[in-house]
Image: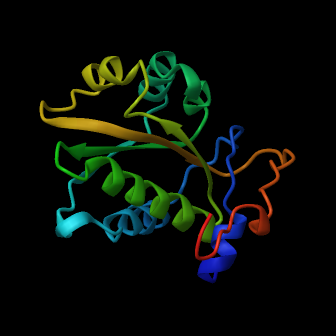
């Protein structure tokens, strides 16, 4: 799939078929995260991949806005070493993962991590080392139902040229 088509195809999905993502597909998705833009080539990210249903169900109990993580075949947790641009870098890696997934026919939903009240509890549960922070929880899988997509604002409403 072409890049602009993948961007248009990506949308938040919260209902998934219980079909596993093939390892080679998951590897390609993760590699897209590795290729993200990063400040000063810092590359502070690490990717924690959860495929175990019991572990995902336990995490879903902690991540209150991501209960559907329990039913997604995969949850990728983007974790960054504390650094000057960790949040921006981790967000860039997260977006690359979401778009690559869509390009490969896998849908997803980004669940907030860094600013969430449950972040510390999730970091403890996942044994995230000191000096690292969760940036995002990314639920991935094959969409089980086509829910209506939330409309995007028209480009003309958000583009300003030369001055506000």
Q: Which quadrant of the view contains residue 128? A: top left
Location of residue 27 in the rendering, given as x and y in whole percent from the top left corner: 39, 64
Quarter holding the N terminus? Answer: bottom right
Viewed as shown, does residue 69 lie left or right of 86? right
Q: Residue at x 49, y 58 (%)?
A: 95
Q: Residue furthest bottom?
A: 2
Q: Quadrant of residue 40?
A: bottom left
Q: Nearer the viewer, residue 47 or 159?
A: 159
Figure disc tally: 0
Residue 26 in the image: x percent, y percent?
45, 60
Q: In the drawing, does residue 95 fall left or right of residue 115?
A: right
Quadrant of image for the C terminus: bottom right
**Is 90 drawn above or below residue 10 in the view shown?**
above
Query: Relative to residue 96, is residue 107 drawn left or right?
Result: right
145 left or right of 119 in image:
right
Q: Nearer the viewer, residue 55 or 80?
A: 80
Q: What residue appears at the point 29 percent right and 27 percent down from the top-left corner?
A: 126
Q: Residue at x 39, y 61 (%)?
A: 30
Position of residue 58 measured from the top left corner of the image (x, y, whole percent): 45, 19
Q: Relative to 70, say whether 3 is above or below.
A: below
- Residue 89: quadrant of the picture: bottom left
Q: Does 52 appear above or below 20?
A: above
In the rendered image, the vertical position of residue 122 relative to residue 4, given as above or below = above
């Amino acid at each position: 799939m072409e890049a602009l088509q993948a961007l248009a195809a990506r949308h938040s999905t919260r209902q998934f078929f219980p079909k596993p993502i093939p390892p080679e597909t998951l590897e390609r998705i993760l590699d897209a995260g590795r290729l993200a833009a990063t400040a000063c080539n810092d590359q502070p990210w690490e990717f924690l991949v959860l495929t175990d249903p019991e572990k995902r169900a336990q995490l879903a109990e902690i991540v209150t806005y991501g209960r559907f993580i329990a039913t997604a075949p995969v949850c990728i947790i983007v974790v960054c070493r504390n650094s000057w641009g960790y949040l921006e870098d981790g967000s860039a890696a997260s977006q690359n993962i979401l778009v690559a997934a869509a390009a490969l026919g896998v849908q997803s939903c980004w669940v907030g991590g860094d600013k969430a009240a449950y972040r510390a509890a999730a970091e403890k549960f996942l044994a995230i080392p000191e000096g690292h922070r969760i940036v995002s929880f990314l639920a991935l899988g094959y969409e089980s139902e086509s829910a209506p997509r939330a409309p995007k604002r028209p480009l003309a409403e958000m583009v300003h040229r030369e001055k506000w």
